[in-house]
Image: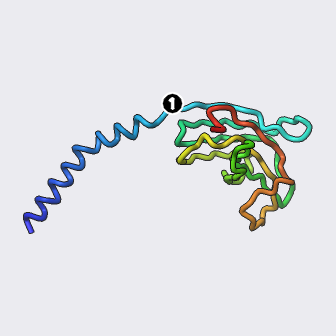
Amino acid sequence: MQKGIIAITLIAALGLALAPLALTNVEAQVEATKCQTGALIGYGGTVFGVANVCTNGYTVNVDLATNYQPKEGWVFNAWLVDDSYEGSGYPLLMGKVLEQGTLSFNQIQTNARTWTDIVVTQQPANSLSPLPSWSNSVAQTWLTPPFGQ
C-alpha cells in the first residue's frame, strides 16, 4: 500500500516537473491576437451596427452592437460564416442579439481564421430550425485577413 502511494506521488511530481515544458510548446503555437472593427451594413447601405472581431488563430472573440430592434415576435441572430468562394458555406450560430442590442461570443476553435463574414438574421423567436434564414438577413460585415484563410 505504501509503495503504491509513493509511486503515485513520484508520478505526480514528475508530471508537475514536466508540465512547463509541454506548456511552452503550446504557447509557441499561439499567434499574436489581431482585431478588426467593421460596420454591419444593412439594406441600402444603412449602418445596422458594429462588430469587433479578434483572433489569435485558435480563438475567436466577437462583440456586436446595434440600436435596432427586431419586429415583435422575432429575434436577431448573429452568425459567423465561411462563405468565400472556396469555403464551405458553413454558418456557426453565435447566438441571439440581446434586447440591449449586444452580443458577445468567445470560442476556442481549431482554425478561427476560416470565417469570412458575420451575418445578422431576423428569425421567429419560436423557430426550431438550427439553420439561418438567409432571406431574413438584415446586415453583414466582411472580415479581412487574417480571416478567410
Q: According to the image, label 1 marks what residue? A: 32
**Which residue: 63% across, 43% down?**
114
Label 1 environment density (alpha carbons within 10 Å; few <14, some 14–19, many ≥20): few
Colouring style? rainbow
The image quadrant of residue 64 is top right
> Where residue 79 sits: x, y (%)?
71, 49
Up/down of 33 relative to 13, above or below: above
Q: Is residue 40 left or right of residue 12?
A: right
Number of callouts? 1
Q: Is residue 94 left or right of residue 125?
A: left
Q: Identity of the amino acid at label 1?
A: Ala
**Which residue: 36% across, 38% down?**
25
Of residues 107 and 110, the one drawn nearer to the viewer in this rendering: 110
> Where residue 40 sits: x, y (%)?
78, 38
Is residue 98 something that shows in the picture?
A: no
Query: Which quadrant of the figure contains the C terminus?
Result: top right
Q: Is residue 7 left or right of residue 45?
A: left
Up/down of 35 relative to 102, above or below: above
Q: Outermost residue toward the front?
A: 86
Q: Outermost residue toward the left?
A: 2
> Where residue 130 sits: x, y (%)?
71, 62
Up/down of 132 relative to 113, above or below: below
**Which residue: 71% across, 53% down?**
96
Query: Which quadrant of the figure contains the N terminus?
Result: bottom left
Is residue 69 something that shows in the picture?
A: yes
Of residues 119 and 65, the one drawn nearer to the viewer in this rendering: 119
Of residues 66 and 52, the one drawn nearer to the viewer in this rendering: 52
**Which residue: 54% across, 38% down?**
57
Does dot 1 land on a helix, a strand or a loop?
loop
